Image (cartoon, helix red, strand yellow):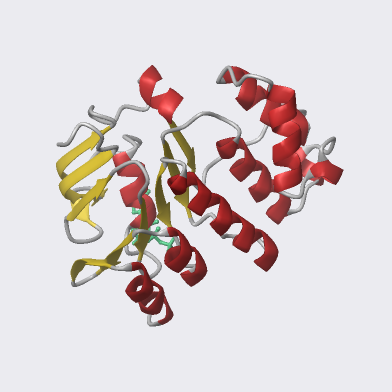
Amino acid sequence: MPEETVLSVRALSVGYDDEPVCAPIDLDLTPGEAVAVIGANGTGKSTFLRTVLGLQEPLAGRTRLLGAEPDPRDGDLRASVASVLGDDAFFPSLTVTEHLLLTALGHRVPDARDVVTDLLEEFGLTDRADALPAALSSGQRRRVLLAAAFVRPRSLLVLDEPEQRLDAGMRNRLAELLVEEREDGGAVLVASHDPVVVERVATSVVLLHDDGVRTLDPAAGAAAIAAL
Ligand SMILES: Nc1ncnc2c1ncn2[C@@H]1O[C@H](COP(=O)(O)OP(=O)(O)OP(=O)(O)O)[C@@H](O)[C@H]1O
């Protein structure tokens, strides 16, 4: 594995109770690249993301994440990998600002208050800064989770269908932020059903399908989404 490889996956089989949910997957991700994982509902995108993050045991194959076996308890890994999966939770008595500050301070972000203020603006949350989670819309809660991933240092960003519940304006802005992320040397692994995210953000696409796994270029990946 080249030294700068962020994620290397070889013949990785993922699934439940010894039953794979899709064909084995191979993938390499280096700084400055974004890989989009696409496929119809139930083809294994979320299962794959959880497995490469070490949140779920693989059935077979090998994953190296930042040079090591993926282990979510590993401090170096937690410091370097920001993820937004589907199971994120909120503290019911902390405001939007307090959630972002907690994340920033926990990761020792310099000038945390200024960074949080900028991200509130970026994610259209400035006027909801003092709101509690229960008083947010589902799209606003999604924005808070995404902002929390961007508020902290990271060398890999893993997002599971980040477009979910976002309006068109925010989906476009998110795509821009993800392009900036890879142009600044970050690595992005994103599962998505959004052709805009796939075509604009991805440098390569992995299509999960019952018949097998294929690697596509971003334009072909965006077209494949329309045909799912
Ligand atoms: N905890 C679980 N136990 C057993 N099977 C599961 C579990 N979670 C998911 N599955 C099954 O594994 C398969 C893959 O699910 P997964 O959530 O990874 O798909 P996905 O590609 O992310 O789908 P979607 O596009 O709907 O989000 C599905 O058939 C699903 O029903």
Q: Is residue 152 left or right of residue 203?
A: right
Q: Position of residue 91 (x, y in %)?
A: 69, 30
Residue 210 vertical placement versus 185 (above, below):
below
Residue that appears at 46% across and 32% down: 154
Q: Position of residue 3 (x, y in %)?
A: 20, 31
Q: Is residue 111 left or right of residue 227?
A: right
Q: Position of residue 186 (x, y in %)?
A: 42, 40
- Of residues 91 and 213, the one nearer the viewer is 213
Q: Is residue 191 left or right of residue 19?
A: right
Q: Position of residue 89 (x, y in %)?
A: 60, 37
Task: Please identify the residue farthest to the bottom as the structure is shown.
Answer: 227
Q: Quadrant of residue 39?
A: bottom left
Residue that appears at 31% across and 50% down: 48
Q: Is residue 128 left or right of residue 87?
A: right
Q: Quadrant of residue 107?
A: top right
Residue that appears at 41% across and 73% down: 222
- Of residues 108 and 63, the one nearer the viewer is 108
- Image quadrant holding the C terminus, namely bottom left
